Image: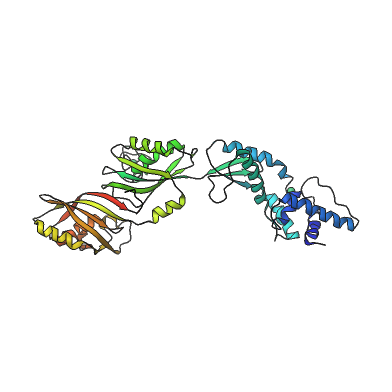
Amino acid sequence: MTDIASRADIALKRDLCDHCLGRIFALVGTGTTNEARGKSARAEASFEREGRGEALQPHEKCWLCEDIFDSLPRFAEAIIKSLSKIEYNNFLVGTRVDPEIQGREERLWSEVGQETAEPIKAELNREIGKIVEARIGKPVEFDTPEVVALIDTRFAQVDLDVSPLFIYGRYRKLVRDMPQTRWPCRQCRGKGCERCQFTGKMYPTSVQEIVGDPIMSVAEGTDHFFHGMGREDIDARMLGTGRPFVIEIREPKKRNLNLGSLENIINDNGRGRVEVVGLRSSSREEVRRVKASAPNKTYRVEVAVHGKVDKAKINEVLQSFKRTRITQQTPVRVAHRRADIAREREIIDLHLDELGENSITFVIRTEAGTYIKEFVHGDKGRTRPSLSEALGVPCEVRALDVIEVNDGTSEE
Ligand SMILES: [Zn+2]
Ligand SMILES: [Zn+2]
């Protein structure tokens, strides 16, 4: 007796459908279905029984699945109906199965072995997926489906798990006093109070809202998250070719967006405050890359100089900082949220841009993570050396612009 014949013979002490019988042998050979495996295993077992002068009972109702596979078209129909409410390019089917069915499957495995078996869910997912795929003409996607249609087979009830939509771009922030991301009011945490004039926010708007709100509205999503390649201070502008970001839209009903026209909508909406360029579709994978990347940056810094310093001295000092390393103890202003440690950072380049009566403006390119304000005023000796220390007079940043995020992908 073959292994299949003897195991099928044991399994068929109970009434099983071809799917449930075949699933015991799911991993034996490829290019066929469990139903076909079940038919041929049944034939082998029947032949064995005839040899013993016994007859196999005809199939009536499957002990294991209660003939759930007869309902495949109904499940597929429910999923197609549910999917019709959203836009998607691929999908995956998931199944919730009655725990009693799974319990019976495990009992069967304990009697006939499970080394070549697959669980009923796997077969249901695949077989429903095949029907849906053929009907809607969009492919099943296993790794990163845009939507998972989860069907509870007890009630043929479908829940959609819609993957977020990711859009990459670069933004420029043309104004000061605007945070990069939405910032809920500290006092009321977004509910609205007197302090925030019932806006629920610390600032009227943010780059995230100017960029995210129009996209969310077009995509008919429920929320957005902003992933920037670092962030500038609230009072700093972000100029040049802009800063890379990925915006994530949760539960979008539309995902095949016209990004060119969205770019126009955002730029109209953000006129004079925020601009975006180069919108294109992105992925969770790229969010990881954007967050992990630490490009060096170029700033224009306007500094108030409190004291008399001649031009020669200024030039000499600026020159002396080129290609040097400075040590920065965590600044006082961020010490409440960062560990207090000393970091070494490189000043890659630095040159004078403008010399005023009591001010200087210079352009500085530094390694990622350099605190520019502290480099200028010295942070009470926590940043050394500093511009203030080298010039021998107190200095402070009056205005700060990021003029380039040198991530190597900007268009210029
Ligand atoms: Zn069955
Ligand atoms: Zn508030």
Q: In the image, ligand 2 is in what quadrant?
A: top left
The image shows residue 46, relative to residue 270, as above or below, that is below
Indicate left or right for 187 with 24 as reference: left
Q: Is residue 97 visible?
A: no
The percent position of residue 230, horizontal first and vertical second, equals 34, 52
Indicate left or right for 205 with 59 as reference: left
Quadrant the N terminus occupies? bottom right
Answer with the quarter of the image where residue 11 lies. Answer: bottom right
Q: Nearer the viewer, residue 146 or 342?
A: 146
The percent position of residue 97, horizontal first and vertical second, equals 66, 47
Q: Nearer the viewer, residue 254 or 162?
A: 254
- Residue at point 80%, 58% (across, down): 5
- Residue at point 39%, 43% (across, down): 279
Q: Nearer the viewer, residue 88 or 195?
A: 88
Answer with the quarter of the image where residue 131 lies. Answer: top right
> How many tags in the picture?
0
Indicate left or right for 300 with 121 as reference: left
The percent position of residue 159, horizontal first and vertical second, equals 57, 42
Indicate left or right for 85 with 381 as reference: right
The percent position of residue 225, horizontal first and vertical second, equals 41, 45
Q: Residue furthest front?
A: 412
User: Which colouring convention does the figure follow?
Assistant: rainbow
Q: Is residue 394 visible?
A: yes
